[in-house]
Amino acid sequence: QGGREANQVSDDYRYQDGNYDAPNDGYYRGGDEPAQEEDAQSDVTEGHDEDDEVYEGEYQGIPHPDDIKEKQKKRGPAVADEYRDRADLMAERMEDEEQLAHQYENIIEECGHGRFQWTLFFVLGLALMADGVEVFVVGFVLPSAEKDMCLSSSNKGMLGLIVYLGMMVGAVLLGGLADKLGRKQCLIISLAINAAFAFLSSFVQGYGFFLFCRLISGLGIGGTLPIVFAYFSEFLSREKRGEHLSWLCMFWMIGGIYASAMAWSIIPHYGWGFSMGTKYHFHSWRVFVLVCSLPCIASLVALKFMPESPRFLLEIGKHDEAWMILKQVHDTNMRAKGEPERVFTVSYIKTPKQVDEFIEIQSSTGTWYQRWLVRITTTLKQVWDNVLYCLTAQYRMNTLMLAVVWFTMALSYYGLIVWFPDMIRYLQDEAYDSRVKIFEEEEVSHFTFNFTLENQIHRNGEYRNDKFIGMKFKEVKFEDSLFEDCYFEDVTSSETFFENCTIISTVFYNTDLYEHKFINCRLINSTFMKEKEGCHIDFEEDNDFLIYLVSFLGSLSVLPGNIISALLMDKIGRIKMIGGSMLISAVCCFFLFFGNSESAMIGWQCLFCGASIAAWNALDVITVELYPTDKRATAFGILNGLCKFGAILGNSIFSSFVGITKVVPILLASSALVGGGLLALRLPETREQVLM
């Protein structure tokens, strides 16, 4: 009982002091007697105990027995924690977190929703916009980049998938680090990596280095999605969370619109670039890549003026910093409402028990590289422990069900998003091939060709003493033809081939008619001089405006779905939103059987995107709400990484059936959506839940 009374006195002293706990050195101090200055310490009391440990303090007289008991009681738990079972420590921490969750909800309600949240909304919106832009960039530059870098089909496919691979790794790694290093710090790292390597990729010339830059750029931007939603949700009250997280999702749509508009207005303009000699070319598609990094840079600059999440700071025991930020939120909102006299009434906030304090002790010893090694390895171990924690009995079922829903949604959505433009291009190619002109057994002599030949087939022709000067071949094929004493100069070609032809005494000067374009041909006394180097781009012909329009309309079509999901998210709940949206999207897939024209495909794409966006928004919200603060970004990162894996599979599977059949992609997408939608209905509703 004496120990309990002493402990209560100590608690009262600590509460009245407000800044520092009572010293835990075991020496008696009078109730009102202040501690002596360091200069006044007595050398008489300096000595050695039985363990030869030096101690120092001022003379205070003989300690009272109750003070000795108090010292032992206060020292006991600190030593015993090292030997306590981790499960007991975690149970105590969970109890503290539950108390903190309800107190924090009340604090956020007192702070109100106003200018601060709207400022953060636009700053984080720019980061989310950068994520949306990154998804579209490679698809838009691929037709130009494949010619500029002479990409083969396999290289072209790798370039399309490399960004998703980087985003998959970045989501898991940076999402996990955000739970240990902080939301703001990791988001800055994520955006800085993306901005630096996206900027660099616009200047590099080699395919390998460009691929590496896009991989690291994707890794950086992959961390933004889990961090942004975890960050913003911790400044929102329960009543506002679903609606405003859904409004935040609109910036992903804005990113798609921005990328489509910039591609449409920049890439076709060949003159928007420069060359340095014959080796370095900065074409307009590189200008487009450069412009697409601007939202990321803008968000990075604005984020420097925003504070860390106070919920995260409380989770790691930084009470005073969290209190100051919450006061800043309160005062900013009250001034904006015209009530600057309102006082922030919170004086103390519950902080959970810290179970990893020994890490800082280890990290403060040894040389600098040893300290960094300890910090890095320990942090990575904590991230891995968080990953495993998401699969413990408490969260295993929710994690597995969410993983299936995320994966099925990504497989169908990203697969169809790639399949739609490919199908439209295939329909265009079919229409183009149907207009081919065929010339049989023509004889041309002493004629100069100085104009473009396009979409033609010449069979069994004879060409004698003809000149082909300063001209272009596009989709031209010569079959079983004879070329004798002809002269080719400054000729460029695209999809042009000579099959089973006989070429006698002909000169090719400064052309791109390479050896692989002559299939089973006989070359007799023919000369190739000064062949063109590299690949050549004809922007006006090779970049189809319709593809940009399709992506633009597809991004714009999600606007109604975004508005509806934001207005109804807190009314009908997250689960019904996910299930209903995925089932409606599955029905939209069946109508794709009737899409036999370009306009029909565009229409069904817009309908599908508009119906599916509500499921994406609800998935983002429920993933944030199902996990505690110290695991939130990690869990979101794992699920988002799985989503990107589904996107890689969807892109690979769906694109392989273009021009072969529509049945497999449509049935696969609709089946995945139905299965995921029905499973989503078994998830717990989180609409009335406080953030743990």
Image (cartoon, rainbow, N blue to C red):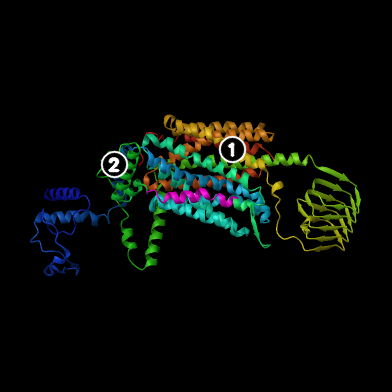
Q: Position of residue 300 (x, y in %)?
A: 46, 51
Return the residue nearer the eye: 515 or 640: 515
Label 2 SS: helix
Label 1 SS: helix
Mark 1 or 2: in front is: 1
User: Mostly what secondary structure, the magenta segment?
Assistant: helix
Residue 305 in magenta?
yes
- Tell me the kind of residue under disc 2: Gln
Give the residues drawn in magenta, as a range: 288-307
Return the residue nearer the eye: 112 or 115: 115
The residue that label 2 is drawn on is: 99
Q: Is residue 401 visible?
A: no
The residue that label 1 is drawn on is: 554
Q: Position of residue 255 (x, y in %)?
A: 53, 43
**Label 2: how many Cα within 10 Å (few below 14, some 14–19, many 20+):** some
Residue positioned 76% across, 57% down in the render: 512
Residue 424 in magenta?
no
On-image quarter of the C terminus: top left
Marking on residue 653: none
Q: Earlier in the sequence, mark 1 or mark 2?
A: 2
Q: Position of residue 356 (x, y in %)?
A: 32, 55
User: Horizontal placement of 212 versus 25: left or right?
Assistant: right
